[in-house]
């Protein structure tokens, strides 16, 4: 079996679906989406809460409904889907090896590829919680799949470690399902997810949040019986005397997401040490010509609407590349994370592509600032654009738009920096 | 009850118990192996460095030294017959600083006395050439070419499976409670699942072997002290070393080592903490720090951020005196026909190098039985071969294409980090020794051991286990009934749930 496609998208989550749709609209003839699950939609399928689509559709949709709009559009456009199929390998020459219980084990060729594998959750060993290793320590996303897709409750009495969005959303979900959520512990002094999730999922349901707290020890031989919680200082060291045993049968972890890049890594695609995702330009093209990346595989987003936008851009670029109309980048303008910025995406701008389309730089702040702030893009010596906001929080992505009127300054700068700082410091 | 009568009962389903079962299954004997847990390989056999030691470390003259060197030599053939992963990788004991050199030479001398083949001394350049990431203060190393790395789970399970293929019975969830003693002779055992009669009982109860023998008034002074060891497993994408690396041993033991594994991960550990509780396999913040520092002494670039898993296990440190005259050593293996009572063989105090020695221990037990006048007749139809089942993850594209032709479920990847397929899982559930828990599948296939630590596969494996075993997903567990994953269906809110 041999297939040739113009654009092959790996992953049918929000980034992949948007990429495929935009690739088709931009002129790619044969577009294929490959998905390892049996249905398209990605993690949205287990996100049955609302809050999706406020930007894209000006509507407040649950995850599966948001996904369905894209699935319907993709089907109507005649985009091919291969479901229940896993991509085992990709090569720089854009050959893909696929494994499918329905179609067998085979390879296909693509003129352009969009990586849209999403992300995965950090696990217990990655944050090294000592103690026993019983059943009942799950990531929030695993629990979410069990409750919302498979219809089972993985515990009765929960402690949640980490104030990530999935953890907070699960606190509400589990409470609604009759479980008791004892508390949410967060090692940092600030929330790691969205404020709206804190209000709607914890505060409204009387689930206490303890900042600067963590789990010192898991107790229980076969099933979790309790956790030992402890306060930490600013260096995350345990504060002696603050230990407290919290009886529970389940510890959920919501301690961060990591872009899923096993395929990219094996293919030799250049990854950023900070984001864990591929280094990309404004078309979301990786260092390998014709291989694009979009969504949480590049960096972890806060809202799905922005993931879909990224998918649009990557899909557009992929279609142009497949049709031979995307010029090969000659040189690039580096975009650096400046003051109090953890990272910026894209990491590079292709100067030839700085034409009529605005470019959005996305970034995350390192330390929270709870006062009026500037987000500023500059050259080594000179400000190019800045916009203000009421705060900057690590849980919320920050975007700064570069419009065509600024492109002359960008080209002159040769290298960009993005800073975030309090107005009072300016 | 005729059905409950055996020639020999083996208490304990670790690697040594499994090896004994397999070596005895060659003979016309009715064999039973009982294990209190839900699977094989759940004690010390599951928590170690997975190294087949060369044998330079145990004191010359000790049973540990003799059986280590002999056992090591048996692994090649054994791994081929039983289809488990084994590589003769060699190892380096690395001296960091001049002051460690004399102890390194002493180790070399012990190795020669123990009859360890293929040992050499390397200078600093050779050490760095073979292991570029080594501590730059390394001044040289002792090389032992016969050291190997193995998958201890596969080794245990494949071995026991071959015993079952040759007629042995394995019973899980069956815990020894007492001996049946008649006329001063052992006639069988009492368990939580009833009485089993046998002419011989082989006590391979690991950390509990002392308690078992004491119930027959055997070796009242023998005591097992649990020694806990903690370990890190690192992501192969972040840490790649080429060798099995030991520090120069000190009075505290072999020390914290850094080793490659047959799965490509790097492991660091263990430390050695004497503890009281034989069930306490908890990791500790202090212990993990100790292991990290020990590992960084050998490979300074190791960063805890690369951690993919941590674990701890207990070693069964005994206090048996070495039986060789003139050798003053009081932590030797205790492998004997119990002198106090007829019908009991003790195999106790099997700490390191227990995994390496395990086939030689089994051979030794066979000899003890022959010496005791047991007339062991070889079966005409003994089959020493247990074919390895296909492993999708290690195959080439062409091999995978051929494999999925035999069963399309080989093309459905369930564990996305380690690329374990549905057909592999199903085959383990229906193997001669069925995998009935999540961890049992993990031990056999390496599923769930990667970067996501089972986060994606756990709900899927739960479904597969329920379907294949004909049970509810609510009954699926991590490692037995006390460790079920799920409590009830959602929407099925019970009275009182909110007051829990």
Image: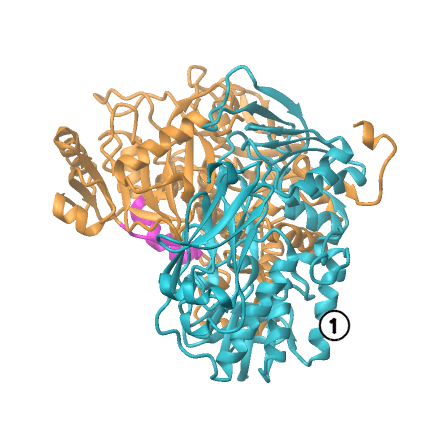
Q: Main secondary structure of the magenta part?
A: helix
Report if residue A369 lies within the magenta region. Answer: no
The magenta stretch is B72-89
| Letter of the chain that mark 1 sits on in the rendering | A
Kind of element beneath mark 1? helix
Where is the N terminus of chain A found, in terms of image quarters? Answer: bottom right
Q: Which chain is cyan?
A: A
User: Residue at point 55% right, 82% down?
Assistant: A5
Q: Is residue A254 left or right of B232 when viewed as pictured?
A: right
The residue closer to the viewer here, A315 or B138, is A315
Disc 1 marks which residue? Answer: A72
The residue closer to the viewer here, A109 or A77, is A77
Q: Which chain is orange?
A: B
Residue A126 point in image, percent of width and height: 49, 41
User: Residue at point 42% right, 32% down?
Assistant: B230
Up the image or down, B355 lies above or below A333; here it is: above
Q: Is residue B261 left or right of B97 when viewed as pictured?
A: right
Does the image show residue B126?
yes
Report if residue B77 lies within the magenta region. Answer: yes
């Amino acid at each position: 079996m041999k297939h040739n496609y113009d654009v092959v998208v790996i992953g049918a989550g929000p980034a992949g679906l948007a990429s495929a749709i935009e690739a088709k609209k931009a002129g790619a003839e044969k577009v294929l989406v490959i998905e390892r699950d049996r249905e398209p939609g990605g993690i949205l399928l287990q996100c049955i809460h609302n809050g999706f689509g406020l930007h894209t559709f000006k509507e407040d949709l649950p995850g599966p409904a948001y996904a369905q709009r894209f699935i319907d559009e993709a089907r109507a456009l005649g985009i091919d889907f291969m479901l229940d199929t896993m991509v085992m390998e990709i090569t720089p020459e854009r050959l893909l090896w696929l494994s499918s219980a329905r179609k067998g084990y085979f390879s296909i060729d693509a003129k352009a590829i969009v990586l849209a594998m999403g992300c995965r959750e950090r696990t217990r060993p990655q944050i090294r919680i000592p103690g026993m290793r019983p059943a009942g320590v799950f990531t929030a996303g695993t629990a979410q799949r069990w409750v919302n897709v498979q219809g089972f409750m993985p515990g009765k009495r929960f402690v949640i470690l980490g104030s990530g969005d999935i953890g907070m959303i699960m606190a509400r979900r589990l409470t609604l399902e009759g479980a008791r959520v004892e508390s949410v512990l967060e090692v940092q002094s600030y929330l790691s997810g969205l404020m709206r999730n804190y209000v709607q999922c914890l505060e409204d349901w009387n689930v206490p949040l303890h900042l600067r707290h963590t789990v010192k020890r898991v107790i229980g031989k076969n099933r979790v019986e309790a956790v030992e919680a402890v306060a930490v200082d600013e260096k995350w060291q345990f504060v002696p005397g603050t230990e407290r045993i919290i009886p529970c049968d389940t510890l959920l972890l919501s301690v961060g997401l990591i872009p899923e890049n096993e395929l990219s890594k094996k293919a030799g695609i250049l990854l950023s040490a900070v984001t864990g995702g591929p280094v990309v330009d404004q078309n979301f093209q990786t260092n390998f010509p014709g291989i694009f990346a979009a969504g949480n595989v590049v960096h972890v987003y806060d809202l799905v609407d922005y993931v879909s936008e990224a998918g649009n851009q990557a899909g557009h670029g992929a279609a142009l590349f497949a049709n031979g109309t995307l010029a090969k980048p000659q040189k690039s303008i580096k975009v650096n994370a400046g003051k109090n910025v953890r990272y910026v995406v894209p990491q590079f701008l292709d100067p030839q592509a700085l034409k009529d389309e605005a470019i959005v730089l996305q970034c995350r702040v390192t330390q929270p600032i709870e006062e009026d702030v500037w987000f500023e893009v500059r050259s080594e010596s000179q400000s190019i654009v800045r916009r203000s906001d009421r705060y900057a929080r690590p849980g919320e992505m920050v975007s700064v738009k570069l419009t065509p009127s600024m492109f002359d300054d960008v080209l002159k700068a040769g290298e960009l920096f993005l800073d975030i700082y309090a107005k009072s410091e300016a | 009850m005729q059905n409950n009568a055996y020639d020999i009962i083996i208490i304990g389903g670790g690697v040594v118990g499994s090896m004994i079962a397999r070596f005895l299954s060659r003979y016309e004997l009715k064999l039973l192996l009982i294990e209190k847990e839900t699977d094989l390989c759940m004690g010390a056999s599951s928590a170690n460095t997975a190294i087949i030691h060369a044998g330079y470390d145990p004191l010359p003259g000790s049973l540990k030294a003799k059986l280590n060197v002999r056992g090591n030599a048996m692994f090649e053939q054994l791994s081929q017959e039983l289809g488990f992963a084994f590589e003769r990788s060699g190892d380096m004991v690395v001296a960091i600083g001049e002051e460690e050199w004399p102890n390194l030479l002493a180790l070399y001398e012990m190795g020669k006395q123990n009859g360890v083949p293929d040992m050499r001394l390397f200078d600093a350049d050779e050490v760095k050439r073979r292991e570029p990431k080594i501590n730059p203060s390394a001044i040289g190393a002792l090389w032992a070419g016969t050291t190997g790395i193995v998958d201890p789970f596969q080794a245990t399970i494949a071995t026991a499976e071959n015993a079952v293929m040759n007629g042995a019975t394995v019973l899980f969830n069956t815990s020894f409670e007492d001996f049946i003693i008649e006329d001063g002779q052992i006639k069988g055992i009492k368990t939580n699942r009833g009485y089993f009669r046998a002419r011989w009982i082989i006590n391979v109860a690991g950390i509990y072997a002392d308690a078992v023998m004491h119930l027959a008034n055997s070796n009242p002074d023998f005591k097992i002290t649990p020694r806990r060891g903690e370990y890190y497993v690192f992501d192969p994408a972040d840490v790649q070393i080429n060798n099995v690396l030991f520090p120069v041993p000190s009075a505290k033991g072999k020390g914290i080592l850094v080793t490659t594994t047959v799965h490509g991960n790097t492991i660091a550990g263990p430390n050695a903490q004497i503890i009281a509780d034989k069930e306490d396999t908890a990791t500790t913040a202090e212990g993990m720090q100790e292991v990290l520092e020990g590992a960084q002494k050998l490979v300074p670039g190791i960063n805890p951020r690369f951690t993919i898993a941590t674990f701890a296990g207990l070693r069964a440190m005994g206090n048996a005196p070495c039986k060789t005259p003139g050798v003053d050593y009081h932590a030797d293996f205790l492998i004997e026909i119990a002198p106090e009572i007829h019908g009991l063989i003790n195999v106790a105090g099997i700490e390191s190098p227990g995994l390496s020695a395990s086939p030689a221990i089994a051979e030794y037990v066979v000899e003890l039985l022959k010496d005791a006048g047991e007339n062991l007749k070889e079966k005409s139809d003994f089959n020493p071969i247990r074919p390895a089942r296909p492993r999708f993850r290690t195959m080439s594209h062409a091999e995978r294409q051929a494999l999925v032709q035999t069963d399309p479920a080989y093309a459905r990847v369930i564990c996305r980090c380690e690329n374990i397929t549905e057909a592999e899982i199903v085959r383990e559930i229906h193997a001669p020794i069925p995998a009935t828990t999540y961890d049992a599948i993990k031990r056999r296939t390496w599923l769930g051991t990667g970067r996501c630590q089972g986060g994606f596969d756990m709900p899927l494996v739960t479904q597969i286990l329920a379907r294949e075993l004909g049970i509810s997903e609510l009954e699926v567990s991590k490692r037995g009934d006390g460790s079920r994953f799920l409590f009830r269906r959602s929407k099925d809110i019970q009275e009182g749930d909110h007051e829990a």
